[in-house]
Image: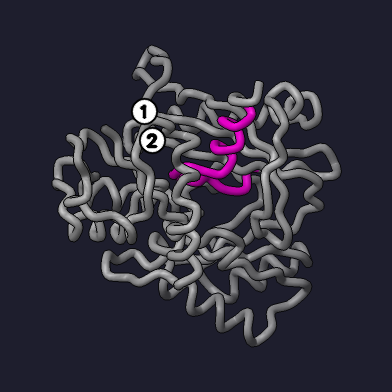
Amino acid sequence: MQLCIFNPEHDLCLAKGRAHYVPPRSAVDFARRDANIMSVLYPNAVCTSVYDFQFSFLNFQLDEVVAWGWDAVVKHELQKRGIEESLLPSDEEINTIRELQHRSTVLPLQEDCHDVRSIEYMESLLKKREHWVMKAPWSGAGRGLRWVHGSLTPIDRDWIVKTIASQRCVIAEPRREVVADVALEYRVDSGQWVVGSTCSRMLPTFLGYSYFRTGSGVYKENVLWKDEQIEAAFPVREARERVEAWLAANVWPRYRGPLGVDLMVCADGSVHVAEINFRHTMGMVAHEKIKDNS
């Protein structure tokens, strides 16, 4: 039997990077209230939050543990509650997930984005372009973002220094006129092997697209459009091909599991990679609901 843990606080836990971290009460309440979200993806599993789970409550043989996203906090909490080490990812695997989730990982797929390691470098970028979005490398749900216009304020400077000290750098992204947010949903623990002249690569399994709405970088909701509607409405095919080639070359076999790639569709028709989430996503949940209603 599968046990599925809903831990939407995952991004916050990755940012902290340690097992002994207490997430905000709002995140814990969300996990407890909406743990059944996991049942959309795993309808035959027992779905709960880690805070409501006790191993002694189980009256069946546990064969697999699935988390919304794996981090040191959820592993530690499950160990405290009696889950065997063999059913959990190793510390090395969790460290790899955290490193992959660092926003610098996706820079090769992002045009005109920069790894900023000093105030001086950020100021040099502002001389070339006025409007930027600065992003903390480990952040999610709209946190860790700052919009810069023309020059750095004292608060901006302080934020940059502190973020570089704690997360190695700041990611600077040009401010774009985004008209739609689309995601590519994948699993990379199964797929198609491609044999080349020098090496073999695993192409990830494409689960489908998702179309979602945001406000000031914060996720709001998914729009329940089918894949063919999204491909007809937005020029995402070329970006998908580029992303899949990069995933095959750089992610397998370092990571196995679900991941979502967020794309920004801009007013000029261009499509840009925003981020990769090495975990389950609300887009995957929305995609399964569309399938169920078809």
Task: Determine whether, in the image, residue 232 is placed left or right of residue 143.
Answer: right
Q: Nearer the viewer, residue 290 or 162?
A: 290
- The x and y percentages for residue 85 are 15, 47
Relative image position of residue 271 (x, y in whole percent)? 72, 39
Looking at this view, is 212 or 42 the one in front? 42
Q: Amino acid at mark 1?
A: Asp
Label 2: element kind: loop
Q: Residue at x 41, y 46 (%)?
A: 68
- Badge 2: few (under 14), some or many (20 or more) residues near its Cα, within 10 Å? some
What's the mark number on residue 257? Answer: 2
- Give the residue type that dot 2 points to: Gly
Q: Is residue 245 left or right of residue 93?
A: right
Q: Picture coordinates of residue 283 (x, y %)?
A: 59, 39
Q: How many marks?
A: 2
Kindly tell me whether residue 241 is visible in this rendering. no
Q: Are marks 1 and 2 in contact (CB under 8 Å)?
A: yes
Q: Magenta segment: does it hold 276?
A: yes
The mark that comes first in sequence, 1 or 2, is: 1
- What distance separates the C-alpha of mark 1 from that of mark 2? 5 Å
Quadrant where the image shows the C terminus: top right
Q: Is residue 87 above or below residue 20?
A: above
Residue under label 1: 189
Q: Residue at x 56, y 44 (%)?
A: 282
**SS for callout 1:** strand
Quadrant hosting residue 15: bottom left
Quadrant where the N terminus sits is top left
Q: Nearer the viewer, residue 18 or 100?
A: 18
* Residue span colored magenta: 273-290
**In the rendered view, how is the structure colored?**
one colour
